[in-house]
């Protein structure tokens, strides 16, 4: 049986009412309406990338060296469209999980009010992602039948700490990358504006989810700890499959099999994945939620060394 490693003493449980109240105040002070915060009429800048070069999956490979600048920019466009599409899927699932959570909560509390506020943020983010995909001249990537079926059932299983850890898997990996790249001078302005909004508002969502995990772990049963520590490992292969797939290279007009093969083995791209996962990995370890099984799954997916 897979068991979680021994844990050090956990920090004191946060008062979730106080956390929610503080985050509600932050939401009032600093939130964005993408419809007016982004200059949707500004033209795309010729020669600028849609993702920084070092984040593109083929950067540093032999294939990358053979590609023209136009091909590299087009690949960055397709990868950006894919990332935003995955973001749309995730935030859709998260909102449905939060709605189900609200059915079990007192609707008069700051906790319930912040959940509703976060859902509003996520709805604006989904609108923003869709508008940016259209603005950069790309098409969204769509879920297959199996993924759509899984997504329909998944929110019903995301209870308690599973909901919060699931939220962190979808938010923190992208957040860590966005913080590193949103000021890149070679980035298309519309993408930089999107990242600024998303990083600012996701910081509150990540804080809420992290505090929710810490709070829940104080009184979690052995079974809950075991399930969360192991099931979160499934996030590794899921993220890898969503972020690197053949459809991206097909749309970019590349040799699909070669591009896919080199991207999967690209040490630079794997290093970017590890950097993105590092803060979340440390948090899961600190809270005793990284079992031998989950650690192995994240390693196989390339998110841990």
Image (tube, rainbow, N blue to C red):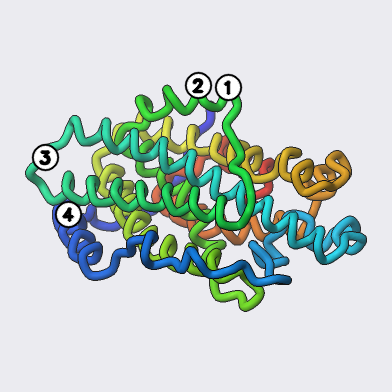
Residue at mark 2: 149
Residues tagged 3 and 2 counted as in contact (Cβ below 8 A): no
Residue picked out by circle 1 = 145
User: Viewed as shown, does residue 223 lie left or right of 80?
Assistant: left
Give whichever of discs 1 and 3 has the lower sequence position: 3
Q: Secondary structure at mark 3?
A: loop
Decide: few, some or many residues near mark 1? Use Cα within 10 Å; few <14, some 14-19, many ≥20: few
Disc 4/disc 3 C-alpha distance (Å): 17 Å
Q: Nearer the viewer, residue 246 or 287?
A: 246
User: For mark 4, does the 10 Å Cα neighbourhood hold few (<14), some (14 to 19), or many (20 or more) residues?
Assistant: few
- The residue that mark 4 highlights is 15
| Residue in the picture at 64% in, 62% down | 50
Sequence-wise, the earlier of marks 3 and 2 is 3
Q: Earlier in the sequence, mark 2 or mark 4?
A: 4
Given residues 273 and 225, the one toward you in this image is: 273
Numbered label attached to residue 107: 3
How far apart are labels 1 and 4 at the CA level?
41 Å
Q: Judging from the image, what secondary structure is the residue with disc 2 in?
A: helix
How far is disc 2 from disc 4 in space, using C-alphas?
A: 36 Å
Residue at image x 20%, y 58%? 19
Q: Quick one: SS at disc 1? A: helix
Residue at 47% x, 28% y: name it.
151
């Amino acid at each position: 049986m897979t068991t979680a490693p021994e844990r050090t003493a956990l920090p004191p449980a946060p008062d979730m009412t106080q956390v929610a109240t503080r985050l509600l105040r932050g939401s009032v002070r600093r939130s964005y309406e993408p419809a007016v915060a982004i200059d949707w009429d500004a033209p795309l800048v010729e020669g600028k990338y849609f993702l920084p070069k070092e984040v593109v999956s083929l950067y540093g490979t032999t294939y990358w060296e053979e590609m023209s600048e136009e091909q590299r920019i087009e690949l960055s466009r397709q990868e950006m469209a894919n990332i935003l599409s995955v973001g749309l899927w995730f935030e859709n699932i998260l909102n449905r999980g939060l709605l189900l959570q609200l059915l079990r909560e007192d609707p008069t509390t700051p906790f319930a009010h912040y959940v509703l506020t976060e859902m509003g943020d996520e709805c604006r983010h989904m609108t923003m992602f869709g508008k940016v995909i259209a603005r950069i001249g790309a098409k969204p990537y769509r879920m297959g039948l199996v993924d759509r079926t899984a997504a329909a059932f998944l929110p019903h299983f995301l209870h308690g700490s599973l909901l919060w850890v699931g939220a962190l898997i979808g938010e923190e990996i992208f957040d860590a990358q966005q913080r590193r790249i949103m000021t890149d001078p070679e980035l298309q302005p519309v993408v930089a504006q999107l990242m600024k909004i998303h990083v600012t508002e996701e910081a509150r969502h990540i804080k809420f989810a992290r505090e929710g995990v810490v709070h829940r772990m104080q009184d979690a049963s052995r079974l809950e700890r075991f399930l969360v520590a192991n099931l979160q490992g499934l996030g590794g292969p899921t993220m890898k499959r969503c972020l690197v797939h053949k459809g991206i290279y097909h749309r970019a007009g590349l040799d699909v099999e070669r591009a896919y093969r080199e991207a999967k083995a690209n040490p630079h791209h794997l290093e970017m994945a590890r950097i993105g996962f590092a803060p979340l990995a440390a948090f899961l370890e600190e809270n005793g939620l990284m079992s031998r099984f989950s650690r192995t799954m994240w390693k196989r997916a390339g998110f841990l060394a």
